[in-house]
Image (cartoon, rainbow, N blue to C red):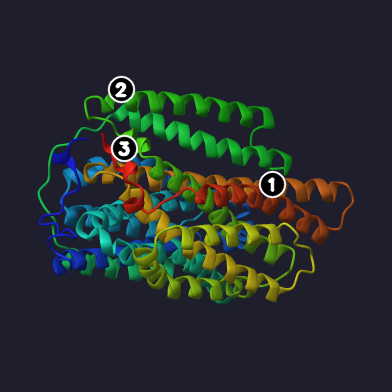
């Protein structure tokens, strides 16, 4: 990609020429923040509904988790194409397309007669969300001066971390007073209003341009990422008594997906010589960007896996209601929302280390605590743990967003945003698949060995969260080496 295919911004203020953000551009950012919040909220709403879906539709947890995994996988497949879409469509057109898809998917899911249609609705929802997030992040990077990006990225961090945290709480309350269909019924009118307001107020930032779309790259990315996560989910599903493929077949699918991923990488390296790559992998030449997204991927795996597995543990092992399970994560979600802007200002003033290292350490500590869960763990202990983890997530996401994309040259922002969002969704989907299937597999094996049902469920939870704890330690180590771009000038050479 060349400089003339960078994200369209119209008149872009810089730190040196215009210290304040263009009000017209800021209005667009706020519209995108609202749309993204509504869309991302839906990533985790179905996790707490898995027991209800088992009763209503006969869907076992290892299959039901695909309502979350398919959402994130669809985003992972669609996001790499957004560089193409955001160049061919105006800002307003991209927004309308994104919110129209999300609204249509919500309506389909609400009236779905069975699991297959419900899954299809989730996929359509995710396609709209996949366009919204890169549009938001590339807009922020190009219209916000470097010295103020932490503050605005703090708000983006609220969307990406607070929305999925609130999802289980909202779903839990709705499940106790109505059916799972109202998880979508409540969101639908909000999505419609957001679509109408955005269509009226959204401003176009610049002109459209013709951009190439390599169909083979899209196919390879879909096969690689989809195969990886599906294979991971089926390994545990086979042990857990699900109807999926055998363990050997699942391992074979994972291996095959790795080969396809290698082909995808080779294809991008070939195409980027002509600036025609679907994903320009030269972003990885920026060491700071690479380190930041590695940490982001690990945190996404832990976060989305936890937001899915913890409600299952609370309902099936601790015997909490949907509302009670949702309320456990609510204080942490509130703390995360309140801290977002504050942490953004700290990043602008103090940099990465003061936030990211203790933030990732808090996440690792909580994952370690979750690896000790029993069938009699105190609910208040879970509330405190969730608050602690939410604070750690809030301290981590804002510096990671700002440091990763800020380490790239402007014409690579769209590719960097696509890589970051794709990795986040694939890692999150893998986290959901691994934690749920590990929990199911271990619980089933313990029950088969004669262990009581609740104790077996607790053992499954411990095994799942032990995995998260181990990978979280890797994030802490990597966090030590992430720098604020101003302190890491070599990172900017990644654009060559």
The residue indicated by pointer 3 is 494
| Label 1: element kind | helix
CB contact under 8 Å: marks 3 and 1: no
Q: Which of disc 3 and disc 2 is earlier in sequence?
A: 2
Residue 230 percent across, percent down from the top left: 55, 38
- The crowding category of the residue bearing disc 1, from other C-alpha atoms within 10 Å (few below 14, some 14 to 19, many at least 20), is many
Q: Which of disc 1 and disc 2 is earlier in sequence?
A: 2
| Label 2: element kind | helix
Q: Which mark is residue 51?
A: none
Residue 32 percent across, percent down from the top left: 27, 62
Residue 311 percent across, percent down from the top left: 63, 63
Give me the residue at 57% from left, 30% from top.
254
Give me the residue at 58% from left, 52% from top.
64
| Label 3: element kind | helix
Reply above or below: 124 against 271. Answer: below
Reply above or below: 79 against 198. Answer: above
Of 259 and 144, the residue lying toward us: 144
Q: Which of disc 1 and disc 3 is earlier in sequence?
A: 1
300 on left or right of 147: right
Q: Which mark is residue 438?
A: 1
Q: Nearer the viewer, mark 2 or mark 1?
A: 2
Of 117 and 387, the residue lying toward us: 387
Residue 395 percent across, percent down from the top left: 48, 64
The residue indicated by pointer 2 is 270
């Amino acid at each position: 990609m060349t400089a003339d295919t960078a994200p369209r911004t119209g008149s872009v203020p810089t730190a040196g020429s215009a210290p304040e953000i263009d009000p017209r551009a800021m209005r667009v950012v706020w519209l995108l923040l609202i749309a993204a919040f509504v869309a991302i909220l839906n990533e985790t709403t179905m996790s707490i509904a898995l027991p209800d879906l088992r009763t209503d539709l006969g869907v076992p947890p290892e299959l039901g988790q695909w309502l979350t995994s398919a959402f994130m996988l669809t985003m992972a497949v669609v996001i790499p194409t957004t560089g193409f879409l955001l160049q061919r469509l105006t800002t307003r057109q991209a927004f309308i397309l994104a919110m129209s898809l999300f609204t249509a998917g919500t309506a389909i899911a609400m009236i779905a007669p069975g699991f297959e249609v419900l899954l299809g609705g989730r996929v359509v929802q995710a396609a709209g969300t996949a366009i919204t997030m890169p549009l938001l992040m590339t807009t922020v990077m190009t219209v916000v001066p470097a010295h103020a990006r932490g503050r605005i990225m703090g708000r983006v961090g609220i969307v990406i971390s607070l929305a999925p945290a609130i999802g289980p709480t909202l779903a839990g309350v709705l499940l106790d007073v109505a059916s799972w269909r109202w998880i979508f019924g409540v969101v639908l009118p909000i999505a419609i209003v957001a679509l109408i307001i955005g269509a009226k107020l959204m401003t176009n930032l610049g002109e459209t341009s013709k951009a190439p779309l390599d169909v083979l790259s899209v196919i390879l990315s879909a096969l690689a990422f989809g195969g990886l996560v599906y294979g991971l989910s089926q390994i545990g599903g086979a042990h857990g008594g699900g109807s999926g493929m055998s363990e050997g077949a699942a391992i074979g699918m994972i291996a095959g997906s790795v080969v396809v991923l290698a082909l995808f990488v080779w294809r991008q390296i070939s195409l980027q010589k002509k600036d025609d790559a679907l994903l320009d992998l030269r972003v990885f030449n920026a060491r700071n960007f690479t380190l930041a997204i590695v940490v982001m991927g690990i945190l996404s795996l832990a976060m989305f896996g936890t937001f899915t597995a913890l409600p299952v543990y609370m309902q099936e092992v601790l015997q909490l209601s949907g509302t009670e399970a949702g309320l456990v994560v609510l204080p942490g979600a509130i703390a995360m929302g309140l801290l977002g802007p504050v942490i953004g200002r700290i990043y602008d003033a103090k940099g990465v280390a003061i936030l990211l290292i203790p933030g990732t350490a808090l996440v690792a500590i909580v994952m370690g605590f979750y690896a000790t869960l029993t069938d009699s763990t105190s609910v208040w202990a879970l509330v405190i743990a969730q608050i602690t983890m939410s604070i750690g997530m809030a301290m981590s996401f804002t510096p990671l967003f700002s440091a990763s994309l800020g380490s790239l040259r402007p014409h690579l922002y769209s590719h960097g945003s696509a890589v970051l969002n794709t990795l986040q969704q694939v890692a999150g989907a893998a986290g959901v698949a691994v934690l749920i299937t590990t929990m199911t597999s271990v619980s089933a094996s313990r029950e088969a060995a004669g262990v009581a049902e609740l104790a077996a469920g607790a053992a499954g939870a411990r095994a799942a969260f032990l995995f998260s704890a181990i990978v979280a330690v890797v994030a802490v180590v990597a966090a030590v080496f992430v720098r604020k771009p101003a302190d890491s000038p070599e990172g900017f050479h990644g654009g060559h």
